[in-house]
Image (tube, grey):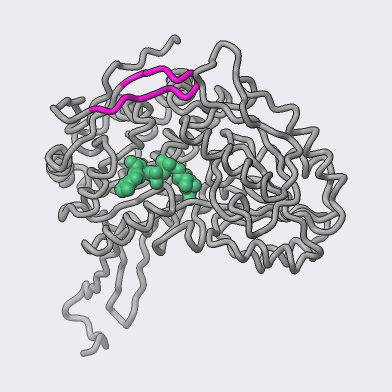
């Protein structure tokens, strides 16, 4: 491997990588099962140090104008491009997604940084003469010290959902990466420092459950963003808001793609399979269930052809761990035992030369019924379950019955049918003939139901609301003027 990953991953506090006596967890590459680093499981003491550094940095950083603050991120954007290969390789190694998927993640991080750089063009404060001689203006002010807690599946992109926006808006940030993939964040810290970000504005505290709880409880942290499973999103949302912080917590997903018989056969089959297998199915936007309406056998046959073109270790990455592989294979086994038909079977996949890796091949399971676990629970692997529905109403009812609500999509050439799904699907992000309907910048990202807790979305313009507070000022410039402001 060309890029050197440090034997030990450190916290990043006040502009320095620091070590302490915390217990350490091995970081394993899922590509081959080898140990690539270790990560500290920090305690509240390290969090206190990071919060103190962020508090100290806040007055100077928030005192700069927005236009000054984005200058750092213009430089940072250039550095992301310059270090693209290195970031890609770290992501590939620690997460297991393919080189191309890892590179796409870094490219997306650049797009997110560009959005943060555009803040001065987006934020113009409101001002109005509310009565003769009196005006009211609204200024957006940062919150202070804020935190971002990330999952394993996007070691680059998810931190870039929050870090550039929150910091450009004048906050000082503490990032808690997933302890499973902590190395990408090290590079992010190095590049932010090289770009000229003052010490203390960005900090990293590594660890797991204990440090997340400490973040939720810390009285000096004003806002927490979380991305991860629904189980933990609920814990974090309840705990952070009960200590009177604002919180947005994105959870898991079970995305339904409704396919009508008139859908374009080739495009639909390749989109559905790409959606379920990209990043080995470990995307919160991945297709999990295809609801086939009426006669769609011709599309299913084409999907089988597409799935067979996917080769683990070549155009399919690994899943994150041995436990994940076992969990995914168990869902397939149980569905088969309950009467579903496995059309393409990715169980027991191995990659020559990487026998220690955690691979599951692309899997297509037909005749799944809504009561099966594979239809209801988040499998988070390269598996598509096909549920048959007699008509569009039944298909929409199946989608609506999911507790989640991240994404839903419809594949059809009928505008009327597409509009029905747009209106009636219970999900925050809808695709029409698109299998991964991520709303790109400047549009915000966020689901509904058990896929998101909190009012704001996490990216785009919605993030401005989340990371700032409004100051409303009423001004009478000319004290002598005859005004009618309550006077
Ligand atoms: P996870 O919930 O296990 O972990 C997320 C974060 O929470 C990590 O930083 C982890 O250290 C911490 N954590 C884990 N258990 C905890 C506990 N008991 N108490 C407090 N903190 C805890 O999620 P993951 O496995 O890293 O990521 C995969 C999940 O994330 C999937 O469910 C996926 O759908 C979801 N996800 C959702 C979105 C979205 O936009 N909705 C995006 C990416 C990932």
In the picture, measured across the screen, residue 279 lies left or right of residue 68, that is right
In the picture, measured across the screen, residue 58 lies left or right of residue 448, that is left
Q: Position of residue 261 (x, y in %)?
A: 85, 54
Q: Quadrant of the N terminus?
A: top left
What residue lies at 38% left-to-right and 54% top-to-bottom?
233
State the image quarter where residue 389 is shown. bottom right
Q: Position of residue 168 (x, y in %)?
A: 33, 44
Ligand 1 quadrant in view: top left
* Residue 117 is at least partly visible in this image: no
Q: Position of residue 417 (x, y in %)?
A: 78, 63
* Residue 482 is at least partly visible in this image: yes
Q: Quadrant of the C terminus?
A: bottom left
State the image quarter where residue 138 is shown. bottom left
Question: Height in image: 417 above or below 373?
Answer: below
Please tell me which residue lies in front, 477 or 74. Answer: 74
In the rendered structure, does residue 28 fall within the stretch colored magenta?
Answer: yes
In the picture, measured across the screen, residue 2 lies left or right of residue 309, that is left
Residue lying furthest front? 337
Please tell me which residue lies in front, 122 or 399. Answer: 399
Q: How many callouts does the rendering have?
A: 0
Question: Height in image: 406 above or below 187?
Answer: below
What residue lies at 46% left-to-right and 34% top-to-bottom?
323
In the rendered structure, does residue 324 fall within the stretch colored magenta?
Answer: no
What residue lies at 26% left-to-right and 65% top-to-bottom?
471
Query: Which stretch did the figure color magenta?
Result: 24-37
Question: Height in image: 286 above or below 478?
Answer: above
Q: Position of residue 95 (x, y in %)?
A: 46, 28
What residue lies at 36% left-to-right and 72% top-to-bottom?
128
Please tell me which residue lies in front, 417 or 34. Answer: 34
In the picture, measured across the screen, residue 41 lies left or right of residue 427, that is left
Please tell me which residue lies in front, 417 or 145. Answer: 417
């Amino acid at each position: 491997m060309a890029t050197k990953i440090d034997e030990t991953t450190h916290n990043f506090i006040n502009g320095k990588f620091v070590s302490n006596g915390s217990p350490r967890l091995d970081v394993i590459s899922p590509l081959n099962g080898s140990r690539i680093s270790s990560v500290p499981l920090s305690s509240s003491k390290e969090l206190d140090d990071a919060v103190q550094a962020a508090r100290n940095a806040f007055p100077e950083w928030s005192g700069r104008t927005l236009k000054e603050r984005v200058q750092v991120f213009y430089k940072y954007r250039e550095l992301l491009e310059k270090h693209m290969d290195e970031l890609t390789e770290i992501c590939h190694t620690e997460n297991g997604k393919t080189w191309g998927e890892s590179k796409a993640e870094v490219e997306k991080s650049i797009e997110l940084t560009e959005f943060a750089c555009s803040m001065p063009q987006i934020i113009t404060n409101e001002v109005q003469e509310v009565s003769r001689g009196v005006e009211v203006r609204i200024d957006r002010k940062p919150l202070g010290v804020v935190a971002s807690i990330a999952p394993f599946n996007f070691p680059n992109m998810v931190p870039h959902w929050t870090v550039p926006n929150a910091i450009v808006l004048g906050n000082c940030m503490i990032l808690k990466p997933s302890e499973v993939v902590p190395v990408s964040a090290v590079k992010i810290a190095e590049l932010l420092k090289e770009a000229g970000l003052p010490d203390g504005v960005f900090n990293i505290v590594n660890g797991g459950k204990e440090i997340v709880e400490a973040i939720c409880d810390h009285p000096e942290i004003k806002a927490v963003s979380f991305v991860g499973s629904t189980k933990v999103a609920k814990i974090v949302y309840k705990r952070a808001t009960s200590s009177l912080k604002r919180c947005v917590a994105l959870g898991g997903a079970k995305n339904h793609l409704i396919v009508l018989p008139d859908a374009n056969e080739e495009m639909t089959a390749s989109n559905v399979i790409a959606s379920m297998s990209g990043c080995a199915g470990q995307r919160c936007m991945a297709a999990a269930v295809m609801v086939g309406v009426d006669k769609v056998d011709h599309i299913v046959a084409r999907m089988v052809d597409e799935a067979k073109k996917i080769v683990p270790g070549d155009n399919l990455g690994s899943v994150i761990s041995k436990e994940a592989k076992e969990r995914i294979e168990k869902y397939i086994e149980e569905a088969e035992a309950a009467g579903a038909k496995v059309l393409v079977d990715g169980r027991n996949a191995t990659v020559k030369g990487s026998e220690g890796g955690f691979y599951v091949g692309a899997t297509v399971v037909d005749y799944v019924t809504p009561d099966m676990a594979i239809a209801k629970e988040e499998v988070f692997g390269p598996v598509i379950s096909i549920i048959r529905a007699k008509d569009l109403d039944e298909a929409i009812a199946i989608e609506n019955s999911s507790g989640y609500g991240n994404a839903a999509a419809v594949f059809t050439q009928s505008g009327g049918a597409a509009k029905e799904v747009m209106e009636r699907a219970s999900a925050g992000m809808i695709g029409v003939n698109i299998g991964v309907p991520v709303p790109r910048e400047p549009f915000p990202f966020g689901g509904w139901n058990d896929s998101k807790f909190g009012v704001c979305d996490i990216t785009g313009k919605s993030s401005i609301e989340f990371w700032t507070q409004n100051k409303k000022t009423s001004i009478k410039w000319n004290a002598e003027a005859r005004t009618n402001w309550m006077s």
